[in-house]
Image: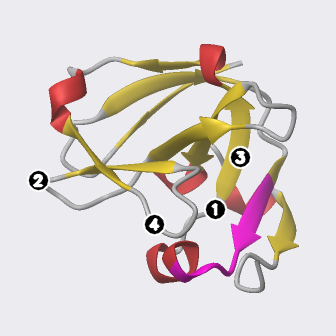
Amino acid sequence: MQYEGSCHCGRIAFDVEGEFLSGMDCNCSICRRRGSILAFVPRSDFHLRTPEENVSTYTFNTHTLQHRFCATCGVAPYAEGKGPDGSPMAAINLRCVPAVDLSELQMTHFDGASR
């Protein structure tokens, strides 16, 4: 199924392909502060609809994920990096995908704070 997502102001908009039945609640320092609920997809299933120059990037710690956010509204709708198998992936903040009913998701809690 294809979904549309965006930051709050719409300067970052994207399409993402996937079946979002579960979400990951991570307690690492950035996810805890942002309140992100994440789902991971192959990078080829994520398509940015707005210009790349609308996207700002933040990295920290091991610099393995590029956390993407909007410099205008501050919302972070996705991140990019490598999956466990080394293939390109996107981490989608499901709070930025209005058609996903968060109350229906099976939540997985990930202890990112201890890593």
In the picture of the structure, the residue carrying the numbered disc 4 is 60
Foreground label between 4 and 1: 4
Residue at x 72%, y 40% (from the top left corner): 40
**Left or right for 62, reference 78:** right
In the picture of the structure, the residue carrying the numbered disc 1 is 37
Give the amino acid type for the residue marked by disc 3 in the picture.
Ala
Instruction: Work out whether mark 4 precedes mark 1 in sequence or the reverse, and give the earlier one.
Output: 1
Q: CA distance from mark 4 to mark 3?
A: 20 Å
In the image, residue 75 above or below residue 47: below
Q: Which mark is residue 39?
A: 3
Give the amino acid type for the residue marked by disc 2 in the picture.
Thr
Residue 16 locus on image (x, y percent):
58, 24
In the picture of the structure, the residue carrying the numbered disc 2 is 72
Q: Is residue 99 visible?
A: no
Give the amino acid type for the residue marked by disc 4 in the picture.
Phe
Q: Quadrant of the C terminus?
A: bottom right
Residue 98 locus on image (x, y percent):
50, 44
- Extent of the magenta region: 23-29
